[in-house]
Image (cartoon, rainbow, N blue to C red):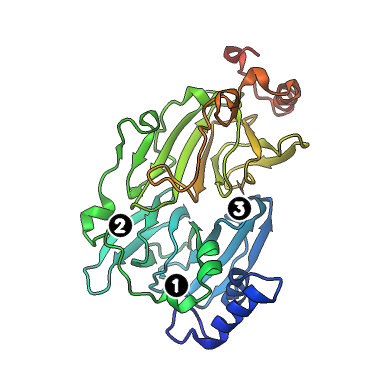
Amino acid sequence: MSRPATTETGNGLERDLNEASAFAPISPYEIYQQWEGVPVYKGFIIDDLLELELGHWARTGGKGAFVNLDGAGGTCDTVIQEIAPGGELRPQHHLFEEAVFILSGQGATTLWHDGGRKHTLEWQKGSLFSIPLNAWFQHFNAQGREPVRMISLTDATVIINRYRNLDYIFNNPFTFGDRYQGDANEWGKPGRYLDGVKKGRVWESNFIADLWQFQPKDYKERGGGNRTTLFEFVDNTMSAHLSEFPVGKYKKAHRHGAGAHIIMLTGSGYSFLWEEGARRKRVDWGRMSMFVPPIQWWHQHFNNGAEPARYLALKPWGFKYKVEELKDTGEDVKKGGAQIEYQDQDPEIHRVFEDECGKSGAEVDMAQFGF
């Protein structure tokens, strides 16, 4: 069986991809997944990303799995990869964007363009970075005893379904010099907050060393003692944000486009998600849980645990390059935004929170918001 990392991707798989588009009830992307031969996880939530069982991935030389949660709506996917102790993955490049978050372990990634110098970036648990579009890269595990596990958000779903030719996607020599020119300092340069963008909450950097240590900015408009920083990197379209809110509090409900993968870093609690006018769905989460609010579903996060709840949201859109109409998730829906203010929410929402805090032993701390 030919593989997309070779120039012999060949006529067999390319033919299958095109025939799937025309005749079969399966997408080209799903056929690609079958050819890759690693597990595919679906559903509404992953309880623990560190416990997810992976399979041998011949093309990458490590272990891996695809995660296609319901809320992504075909706009993006996530890929879990694992590198053996002291091991490495094979070099690769591709025509879809990829943002990488290190779930456990420490190591390094080498990056380069064809014919250019190689530059290496060292990372650890909690590091977040994005691969420049179609640049060569290779991941290494610097530990001799423990594996490395990482998760990546990609838009491979859209790209593979659109082009249906893996040789074009994985073996295209084009260099996106407007995104990454090959300078070592370019990829690892220090981050900075952008003046005047989203009230100064946008941090532009190609590499964030540790999201457990990063201190997000106060963002009182979202309620619940929330702090949030938005991340933009390597001139890619995809982005991310980091949020945290204290024990005994909850954020205001809001909604947005599909594909925001929420990875819980600390804390335990639950979220309500619902379509306009429909019954609320509840998901309970803890450290390393991941879920995705479906497109334009309201969702609201509640911390009835014993520590602040901190999460990373990996998103297939960003603010630097506008690709869709995004309403302000910190502005009242009655004023044209995408947020429900506390005074307008269903009173049952707060009553449930009080009950849940009573069960867990957390003290409700919402008096400053009128509760």
Q: Residue at x 39, y 47 (%)?
A: 321
Q: Residue at x 41, y 74 (%)?
A: 90
> Which of the two discs, 3 and 1, labels the residue nearer the N terminus?
3
Q: Can you give x and y, in whole percent of width and height, for residue 283 in the image?
A: 70, 41
On the rendered structure, is 68 left or right of 125? right
On the rendered structure, is 149 left or right of 86? right
Quarter of the rendering containing residue 224: top right
On the rendered structure, is 244 left or right of 277? left
Q: Residue at x 40, y 33 (%)?
A: 215
Q: Amino acid at mark 3?
A: Ala
Q: Residues within 10 Å of mark 1 (few under 14, many from 20)?
A: many
Does 296 appear above or below 77?
A: above
Q: Can you give x and y, in whole percent of width and height, for residue 121 in the image?
A: 30, 57
State the residue in front, 357 or 172: 172
What is the CA distance from the residue labelled 1 to the residue labelled 2? 18 Å
Q: Quadrant of the C terminus?
A: top right
- The residue labelled by disc 3 is 72
- The residue labelled by disc 2 is 179
Q: SS for tag 1?
A: helix
- The residue labelled by disc 1 is 169
